[in-house]
Amino acid sequence: MLQATQRSSTERYARCIRNSKRIRWDIDKDVIRGRTFDHSKKFLPDGLSKVNELDFLNVDEKTLLSQVQGRTYANIFGLVERFINAKVLEVSRDHWLGDQIVLEALVRFSDEELKHQELFRRIEQMIASRMPEGYTLVPKPNDVASVVLGKSTWAVLGLTCHIELFTLSHYKQSIAPDENLSELFKDVFLYHWREESQHAVLDELEWVREDAKLTEDERDRAVNDLIELVAAIDGILQMQSAADAAYFVKLCNRSFREDEETRIANEVLRAYRWQYIVSGVQEPHFIEILSDLVSEAQLQRIADALRPIM
């Protein structure tokens, strides 16, 4: 039975390798293709940006707010992939002298994450060249990575699996169906989605493998680490949403009432919490994986910690 399980696991790694080879893409040749972003169109769909909740904004203002959010959306992915890649390289060490199929899958994962970081750096440069000065990405990638990597491997892999799964969900359910987005912005996340589809599988496999190594006490401490990581992410979202809301208000060619500025700030924070936390923890497959790994009491502890954010 154990050997059959191991063969099944190895085949899943091997399938990721085959898919990685089949869908391999290049930033310039396949994604950008000499194009620029269409600033007459939205970047993020309404289901992610929540701009339609702000009924006092006109069409152009809603488009602009979606573009400010889209800029941050790309930057946050570049940020999280900094610590994801570092953790993937770390866990690959367990396979250096072991299953070389697993090792190849993780090395490809790392290579693709480095490419994604380059892609999102390029995207930021392109958007910055067309938008007025004043935008700030508040969190620093290396600072965030240092904090995240200080937590247990179980917690980091759990957070990473959560991120990969909501990435897939956002593209399939919101970005792909929307015909009114900038074509280049859609393509960035189409190609990103294609490789992240393999990464989500590898995250799950490595998270389950790490879980099997833990004692009950170690797993309980790891659950606390995961809760602390989600709280840290929420802190980042609170800072970034405030900065983005202020930047958007500054760009608009009119004044807003104090209560309207408050609504803008609150709605951007609600959108960011939906994008980076809520949509992931509500993803059915993430709930299924997590429920298989933790006790009912631990699951309830996580739910209680998430309640104020949800």
Image (cartoon, rainbow, N blue to C red):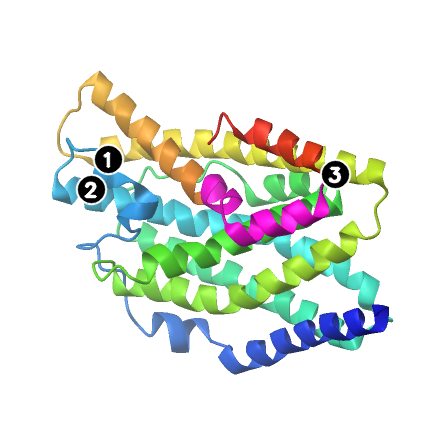
According to the picture, the residue beneath numbered tag 3 turns out to be: 222
Amino acid, disc 2: Lys
**Residue 11, percent from left and from top:** 70, 76
Question: Quick check: is 293 in the magenta stretch?
Answer: yes
* Residue indicated by mark 2: 62
| Residue 242 at x, y percent in the picture | 38, 29
Q: Is residue 42 left or right of residue 202?
A: left
**Residue nearest the viewer, comparing 275 with 38:** 275
Q: Upstream in the sequence, badge 1 or badge 3?
A: 1
The kind of residue tagged 1 is Glu
Q: Helix or strand or loop: what does disc 3 sit on? A: helix
Judge from the rendering whether residue 136 lies leftward or rightward of residue 258; answer left or right: right
Location of residue 93 (image quadrant): bottom right
Q: In this view, does 223 lie to the left or right of 95?
A: left
Q: Which of marks 1 and 2 is nearer the N terminus?
A: 1
* Magenta segment includes 40: no
Q: Please give the range of residues in magenta.
A: 276-294
- Name the residue tied to disc 1: 53
Say if 74 sits above or below 93 in the image.
above
Label 2 vs 3, first from the N-terminus: 2
Q: Where is residue 234 in the image (x, y as percent from the top left)?
A: 51, 32
Query: What is the spatial separation of the Cα atoms under label 1 and label 3, in whole angstroms?
Result: 37 Å
Mark 1 and mark 3 in contact? Answer it, CB < 8 Å.
Answer: no
Instruction: Please name the residue shown 28% across and 22% down the image.
Output: 262
Which residue: 57% across, 68% down? Answer: 198
Task: Point out which mark residue 304 bears.
Answer: none
Indicate the position of residue 91 as horizontal and vertical percent values.
Answer: 76, 58
Crowd rating for badge 3 (residues with CA inside 10 Å; few <14, some 14–19, many 20+): many
